[in-house]
Image: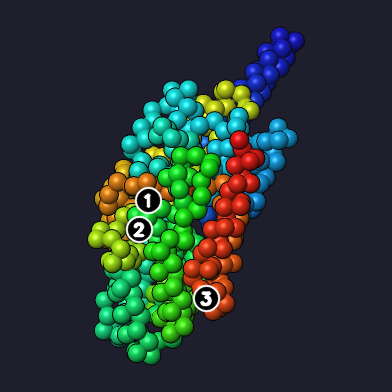
């Protein structure tokens, strides 16, 4: 009887140990800035990885918007309570690079973990934004977008116009729309990103010196060139006539498009699903961002927005094997194609884009491949690779303030851009002093 009890107790103990070991997967904490349905999708991705193996468990944690998430990660690192992975928007790239000792570069992470990793598998227009001077990837691309032109197909048909390809076309089509009874030809979201940063890339002119900040901290802003002034001055004239209607700094102007007030809208390719669900009274289409034919014969690629995943130092080496395996899973064609199709963000790899095409998604959802075509039409140049500027969040705030003076008629395009450059350069010098 006693022997049976011993055996029974031993069996219970072994079962308990096995159950504990089964549950003792190494936890990988991932801080992100995706709320709502995007946050639910992130949870789904993590759950898929967790179910694919038994050694690691990725735990997503929502930390607020992009700025709040990045700020929280910096504070956590200083307190030695940092997550393994943090999602950081593209304008935070220079700040993350300057955080010496805090970042575990993606190329090194994957190499140390023995994970197969070929940067050429990723879209070059995306990876270029997040590489070191010698071309090595610093963070893992995740949710990337680029601006496109959404248009009210019914309105253009009524006005007898085709979707514009150039800014010259925009003026003509805008006037036709006004003549057809529409209040506004076009509006724009994210004016710094679309009308200055991507304008520069599309026309292949510098936004800042030092290869747009990639080559050093002693960078100065250059978006007050004659071509930039010409573009903003033209928008100001169109604002007066109604061809252009300003609607806010972020995506605040989208309701002007949804309601039919403005027949065209320039904004993120990742807005596609929202546009599709919100537009009720007309058919819409998607076209590439226009360019000035008077400035360039063949436009360059636009640059990206969105965010990447940065790995933070300070955890056990075993943990980082899990992070590397998760990045491999995250980059798989199946996961990326699903994320791309669900959200409207760009697929980060060529394989994910091809899988999406094979699955018939682009054919069933016309316009969803426009952003990819626009981003991959040629190799990025020094002016279309991206931007790497310190204190860029604050610089964008300055740009917004100065552009709003133009739209209100309180400043000329030249005076506003000169002032924005001067104020922005002060912020760059502040960042340079802090990171020498």
Return the x and y of residue 289 as percentages of the image width and height.
35, 64
Q: Earlier in the sequence, mark 3 or mark 2?
A: 2
Local crowd at mark 1 within 10 Å, few (<14), some, or many (≥20)?
Answer: many
**Is residue 14 depicted above or below 241 in this figure?**
above
Return the x and y of residue 213 as percentages of the image width and height.
48, 45
Mark 1 and mark 3: span between their CA atoms? 27 Å
Q: Is residue 112 visible?
A: yes
317, 165: nearer the viewer: 165
Residue 3 horizontal side relative to residue 421, left or right: right
Element under label 3?
helix
Residue beneath label 3, please?
A: 407
Is disc 1 in contact with disc 2, using a CB cutoff of under 8 Å?
Answer: yes
86, 351: nearer the viewer: 86
Element under label 1?
loop
Locate the N terminus and report the quarter of the image it occupies: top right
Residue drawn where x is 34% and y is 78% of the image: 171
Q: Earlier in the sequence, mark 1 or mark 3?
A: 1
Residue drawn where x is 47% and y is 83% of the image: 240
Residue beneath label 1, please?
A: 384
In the rendered structure, find residue 202 and report the number of the disc placed on it: 2
Q: Is residue 59 visible?
A: no
Local crowd at mark 3 within 10 Å, few (<14), some, or many (≥20)?
Answer: many
Q: Earlier in the sequence, mark 1 or mark 2?
A: 2
* Quadrant housing residue 110: top left
Locate the C terminus and report the quarter of the image it occupies: top right
């Amino acid at each position: 009887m006693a022997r049976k009890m011993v055996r029974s107790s031993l069996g219970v103990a072994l079962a308990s140990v096995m159950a504990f070991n089964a549950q003792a997967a190494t936890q990988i904490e991932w801080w992100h800035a995706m709320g709502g349905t995007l946050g639910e999708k992130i949870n789904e991705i993590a759950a898929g990885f967790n179910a694919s193996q038994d050694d690691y468990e990725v735990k997503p944690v929502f930390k607020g918007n992009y700025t709040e998430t990045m700020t929280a990660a910096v504070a956590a690192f200083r307190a030695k309570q940092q997550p393994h992975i943090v999602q950081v928007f593209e304008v935070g790239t220079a700040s993350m690079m300057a955080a010496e000792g805090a970042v575990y570069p993606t190329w090194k992470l994957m190499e140390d973990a023995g994970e197969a990793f070929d940067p050429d598998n990723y879209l070059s227009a995306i990876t270029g934004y997040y590489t070191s001077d010698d071309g090595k990837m610093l963070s893992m691309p995740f949710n990337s977008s680029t601006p496109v032109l959404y248009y009210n197909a019914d309105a253009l048909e009524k006005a007898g116009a085709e979707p514009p390809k150039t800014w010259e076309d925009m003026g003509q089509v805008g006037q036709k729309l006004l003549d057809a009874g529409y209040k506004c030809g076009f509006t724009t979201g994210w004016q710094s990103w679309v009308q200055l940063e991507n304008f520069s890339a599309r026309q292949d002119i510098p936004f800042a010196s030092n290869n747009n900040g990639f080559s050093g901290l002693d960078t100065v802003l250059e978006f007050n060139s004659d071509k930039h002034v010409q573009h903003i001055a033209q928008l100001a004239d169109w604002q007066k006539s109604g061809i252009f209607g300003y609607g806010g700094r972020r995506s605040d102007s989208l309701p002007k498009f949804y309601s039919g007030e403005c027949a065209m809208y320039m904004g993120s390719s990742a807005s596609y699903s929202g546009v599709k669900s919100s537009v009720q009274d007309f058919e819409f289409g998607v076209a590439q961002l226009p360019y000035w034919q008077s400035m360039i014969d063949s436009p360059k690629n636009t640059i990206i927005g969105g965010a990447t995943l940065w790995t933070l130092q300070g955890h056990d080496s075993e943990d980082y094997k899990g992070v590397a395996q998760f990045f491999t899973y995250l980059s798989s064609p199946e996961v990326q194609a699903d994320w791309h199709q669900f959200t409207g963000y760009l697929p980060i790899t060529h394989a994910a884009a091809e899988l999406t095409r094979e699955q018939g998604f682009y054919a069933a959802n016309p316009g969803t491949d426009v952003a990819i075509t626009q981003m991959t039409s040629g190799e990025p140049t020094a002016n279309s690779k991206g931007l790497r500027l310190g204190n860029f969040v604050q610089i964008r705030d300055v740009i917004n303030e100065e552009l709003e003076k133009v739209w209100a008629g309180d400043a000329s395009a030249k005076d506003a851009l000169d002032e924005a450059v001067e104020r922005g350069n002060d912020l760059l010098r502040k960042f340079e002093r802090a990171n020498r």
